[in-house]
Amino acid sequence: MKKLRSKGFAIQRALEKDSTISILVVLLGFLVGTILVALVGKNPANMYKALLQSVSGYNLDNGKMNVRYIGETLNYAVPFILCGLSMAFAARTGLFNIGGEGQYIMGLTVAQVVALLGPPIGTFHWVLAIVASMAIGAIWGGIVGILKAKYEVSEVVSTIMLNYVALYLSRIICLQLPGATTYKTANFPETALLSNSFFQKLTNNSLLNNGFFLMLIAVVLYWFIMEKTNLGFGLRATGFNREAARCSGIPVVKSIAVSMAIAGVFAGLAGGIVALGSFKYGRILSGMDNYGFNGIAVALVGNSRALGTMLAGLLFGILKNAQALMQGKQIPKEITFIIQGLIVVFIALRSAISIYLAWLNKRQLQKEVLAK
Amino acid sequence: MITIIKMIPSVLMIVSPILITAVGGMMSEKSGVVNIALEGLMGIGACAAASAHVLMEATGMGGVSVWLSLAIGAAFGLAFASIHAVASINLNADQTISGTGINLLADGVTIFVAQILFNADRTREFKMGMQTDKLGIYPTAYIAIIVVLLAWFVLYKLPFGMHLRACGEHPHAADSVGINVKRIRWIAVLSSGLLAGLAGGCIVLTQTIQYTSNTINGRGFIALAAVSFGRWRPIGVTFAAFLFGTAQAFAIIANNFPALRVLPTEVFNILPYVITLVALVVFSGKNYAPRANGRPYIKGAS
């Protein structure tokens, strides 16, 4: 009897940890996804074969190994991780940045403009393009921050509006670029591309590029700013309790604006990297790329921590790279979207766990009181 | 002038679904639950209606099929809205997260269903959608008018509507006089899902011949904008939906006007969002929004 209770206690302790819940939520998402695949008469094993190939490059069906898949998975993970960091940075300040998508689109657009119109000088060209994409991300996020801090406009509404403003603005701008047709522009000059010949050799000509390094730097910077600087402390304090932060002399209004601007930098960087790393020409977007929206899920799964967000972003990269492989095995690739959506829905439902824990506590107390 | 009169039916065609969805969103927010899942729910409704219509058309049901499909679309919208209701009302979850989850889920579920049913990333084309009346106006316009009038009547003329608004302004006060806050919020969220699903069906059956991942294309978010631009009142929301819908219509038909051809059509696409942003700034500080909007109701907590 006593042993049973201590086991229950261990589960209870585990459920109080955020990381356990994240793992649980992801597993649940996959479980429901698997059941769904089986229900529509497809073989779920094929789904996992595709996922395995996406992670390791190993094809179970013919026993062949191709490292290119690993490179592609990592490349797909980069924008997910960066958009995740964008959402996470705002979340730690108590803000909900649905605007990652808009900031990403603006970054992508400006990177394309600089790539096509900027000076084609060696490394300087792509560095300039990336810096510009980060700057526009900061502006696009900063607008939201200022609207929120100064005019009390809900960031949820304003970011949603700015997402679509960004989409159509991007179309207007990109349609004016050299060689623009209805869906693409002229090719970028070589100097604007992020391609890395070492990575290409290593991963059998995958699209993995210098953006990977930028992502790693961003993750480290995120951790450093958040956990080790005064700025990060102020932001986190604002996130925990805005009034208390204000009373302790933390400039809350400034915190909100700065936080949204930095969040925008991450998403803008993601846009720049996708534009110059994964494509050789400018794209005229006809719809959202959804990296920004999925960044919300990535940050939620990663509990807004640097490492957690990186791992969650990798998971999303794996899913994205597995899409084409699944389609080749007669599994509709949309199952990956469903799994991602389910993960977010389950995260929303996780408050059920805290309600359950509170109920457990109450019952235990009742028992103890009655035993006396 | 004649061109403008000729435009009216197509403007109405585009306005109606936005208006229907916006009224649903307004009901939900009036009761205190923000529903940013409107976009996804419209997609679910549109996909369900399109699939149902294709399958029933093949059995030779004729005109009844259109109306039945609309009902099916609405039913599916309602079913998926219940996820949002459970999360935000019973489990006190963050309403933005659960709304985002449904939006992401809808992206997957709709095309997944199309892949299973029709082996393609879109539903099969149907032969005949909804038919216009003698004036060239689709019945969806009349549905929208009925929905607005009904919502106004329920919200402002029935005791139930007063209870609903009380839940959005001060749920604790409402609870203290015996109003069942959770039940009322459930009804409000479900009706927003029902209306979003219905609107999705309206889009598919009047504006296109199949469901693709591009069918909704931000209209749910426009409806959301219309709710706040319309200051959470039926008349305001109607006006906002008309304004935004007309802007959308212009994006499609601006080519008919030589004077407008100099502007990129995207300018009209941007208008609703920019107008809403500007309006939110201009009217900031004058709290038009329901006071408890977006906050979970936890009994006993002050």
Image: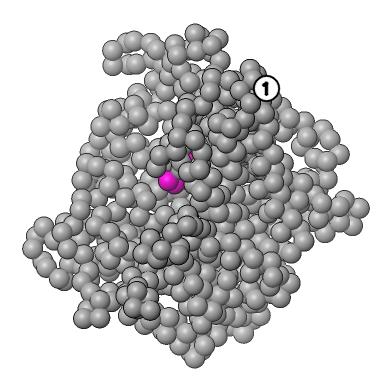
From the top left corner, tell me how far across and down residue B219 is, in percent. 44, 61
Q: In the figure, residue A67 lies in which quadrant?
A: top left
Task: Residue under label 1, please give it.
Answer: A124
Q: Is residue A19 above or below residue B232?
A: above
Q: Is residue A183 above or below residue A148?
A: above
Quick check: A154 left or right of B88? right
Q: Quadrant of the C terminus of chain A?
A: bottom right
* Magenta: main secondary structure: loop
Q: Which residues are magenta?
A: A286-290
Q: Is residue A79 visible?
A: no
Q: Residue at x 16, y 71 (%)?
A: B64
Q: Is residue A329 magenta?
A: no
Q: How many marks?
A: 1
Towards the viewer: B87 or B38: B38
Q: Is residue A206 visible?
A: yes
Q: Residue at x 55, y 54 (%)?
A: A165
From the top left corner, tell me how far across and down residue B275 is, in percent. 58, 66
- What colour scheme does the image use? one colour
At label 1, counting other C-alpha atoms closer than 10 Å, the crowd grade (few under 14, some 14-19, many 20 or more) is some
